[in-house]
Amino acid sequence: MRTIVFDLDGTLADTSGDLIAAANHCFAEIGVSGLDPVRDAATALRGGRAMLRLGLSRVGRADDEAMIDAYYPVLLRAYESAIDTHTRFFPNALETVDALRARGDRAVVCTNKPEALARLLFDRMGVMDKFDALVGADTLPTRKPDPAPYFAVVEQAGGSIARSCMIGDTMTDHATARAVGVPSILVDFPMGGENVHAMAPDGIITHFDELIPTIDRLLP
């Protein structure tokens, strides 16, 4: 049995549309221009604070931490109220999860999204039962790339670290895998904002059809 550890935002699903809508709710209150759903999608997948900082940077206020702190809870509430309006799983992502579990593998999620929001999203989209465990940004005192969340989610699923790997889309995910000492597989999807090839992960996929053969190569 292997334990396949998935990141969520930008790896399993494109959540950028709903994240940007929540950020733009904040910018409307502040009185500054909103983010662009296409141009700024990669920043959205880095989280709420990154979006607030980007929007404020365009009016010369990127270092306004007080404003970011004040509006981060506002953003989270707006996101919670419309968390699944635009979000879509990437093609064949869920089918691949099903195929892995049918082979006896465990599929778990280790995300830097707050745990309650990750669970809410999965519940709304009817997919929570497809995953054996989930750890979010606030489940533990630390978050990725600290290895503790990875260890915790594998333990929750009853898996073995030595028979696990990380599937992600950012340096945070890659650094997590390196900190744990497990294979790093990164997705290279068009919306990604990072050069995954430069990170030299153990595997790169451009479509979920390629994931199981890549896992089989790294964890035979």
Image: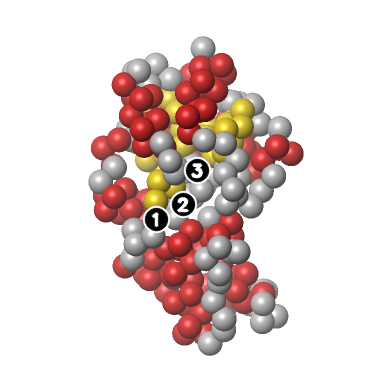
Q: Is residue 14 above or below residue 68?
A: above
**Mark 1 and mark 3: Cα distance apart in space:** 12 Å
* Foreground of the two, 206 or 22: 206
Q: Residue at x 37, y 40 (%)?
A: 134
Which x, y percent locates residue 215?
Answer: 51, 22
Q: Identify the secondary structure beneath mark 3.
A: loop
Crowd around label 1: few <14 · some 14–19 · many ≥20 (10 Å): some
Badges 1 and 3: C-beta atoms under 8 Å apart? no
Which x, y percent locates residue 100?
Answer: 38, 24
Which residue extends farthest top?
A: 220
Q: Residue at x 57, y 18 (%)?
A: 218
Q: Residue at x 60, y 40 (%)?
A: 188
Q: Residue at x 36, y 37 (%)?
A: 94
Badges 2 and 1: C-beta atoms under 8 Å apart? yes
Marks counted in the figure total: 3
From the image, tell me which residue sits under label 3.
11
Q: Is residue 215 above or below residue 44?
A: above
Q: Identify the secondary structure beneath mark 2.
A: strand
From the image, tell me which residue sits under label 1.
87
Crowd around label 3: few <14 · some 14–19 · many ≥20 (10 Å): many
Residue type, mark 3 in image: Thr
Question: Considering only order in the chain, which callout, 1 or 2, is on the residue closer to the N terminus?
Answer: 2
Q: Which mark is residue 14?
A: 2
* Foreground of the two, 147 or 173: 173
**Mark 3 and mark 2: Cα distance apart in space:** 8 Å
**Mark 2 and mark 1: Cα distance apart in space:** 6 Å
- Report if residue 176 is visible in the image: no
Q: Which mark is residue 186?
A: none
